[in-house]
Amino acid sequence: MYLSHNASLVTTHVLQEMKNKGEKIAMLTAYDYTMAKILDQSNIDVILVGDSASNVMEGHPTTLPITLDEMIIYGASVVRAVTHAMVVVDMPFGTYQGNSKIALESAIRIMKETGANAVKMEGGREILESVERILCAGIPVMGHLGLTPQSINKFGTYVVRAKDEYEANKLREDALQLQEKGVFSIVLEKIPAALATEVSQSLKIPTIGIGAGNGCDGQVLVLQDMLGLSNDFSPRFLRRYNNLYTSIKDSVHSYINDVKEVTFPNDSEQY
Ligand code: KIV
């Protein structure tokens, strides 16, 4: 019996119970109504409206340019499709780092205008004041440590993070501080599997890994990547469950051919 499949709505409490019982959490990204409906009807536990929308929906090279207004449009579209999953919306770059009052205003806009269940924020000790203020308003927060793509200009590359002891210790401490503040879960992105396992075991709250091994309490992938909608992004952690790039291309070729050959529409496809 799966907790996630029995509950009509996945809440922070359900995710905590899943960790307590050792049931893994499945999270995927979505940014639009159509895809979110398929994920929800497939019984996914959590849908993340990630700021990876900046890359996969808008074609930007980084997640930095996406705006709060754009995230709200994606978030509201996803929420309209969902009856079961928890919906978490990423707070975009520049809406929470500088000032906790602005952070709270941004989080309130997300919750009011999308109807989502929680927000996600990248960073550790640097953003604790904003995290606390948002939590005080009753808004659940998911943390995000390790490779935090909004800091790409500081890191300089998308390589594995926390390989050295200094950065690993900082991550351990940040995870504990986020937990103490009250975040309900933490995404661990692209860090050594052994470190992710250790952090997951040391925390009471669930961790969700991406490129962080199977010792996390759940996993997340970007939907477009796992469906194979593009073939120009192939990190080691990515498992492709389909090859929709080829499948869609083949369908489009068939359509073009049918139109040119005047075999579409046929007699039964017209009025
Ligand atoms: O924006 C995103 O899709 C994310 C996941 C990769 C965790 O933050």
Image (cartoon, rainbow, N blue to C red):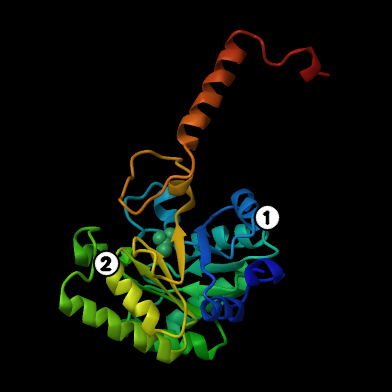
- Mark 1: few/some/many CA within 10 Å (<14, 14-19, 20+): some
The x, y position of residue 1, in whole percent, is 67, 69
Work out how far the residue at label 2 is from the one at label 1, CA to CA, in angstroms. Answer: 33 Å
Q: Which mark is residue 192?
A: 2
Q: Residue at x 57, y 87 (%)?
A: 138
Q: Amino acid at mark 2?
A: Pro
Q: Which mark is residue 41?
A: 1
Q: Nearer the viewer, residue 225 or 163?
A: 163
The x, y position of residue 57, in whole percent, is 46, 49
Judge left or right: residue 202 versus residue 33.
left
Q: Amino acid at mark 1?
A: Gln
Select label 2 or label 1 by which is in front. 2
The x, y position of residue 81, in whole percent, is 67, 57
Q: Residue at x 56, y 25 (%)?
A: 251
Q: Secondary structure at mark 1?
A: helix
Q: Is mark 1 within 8 Å of ligand 1?
A: no
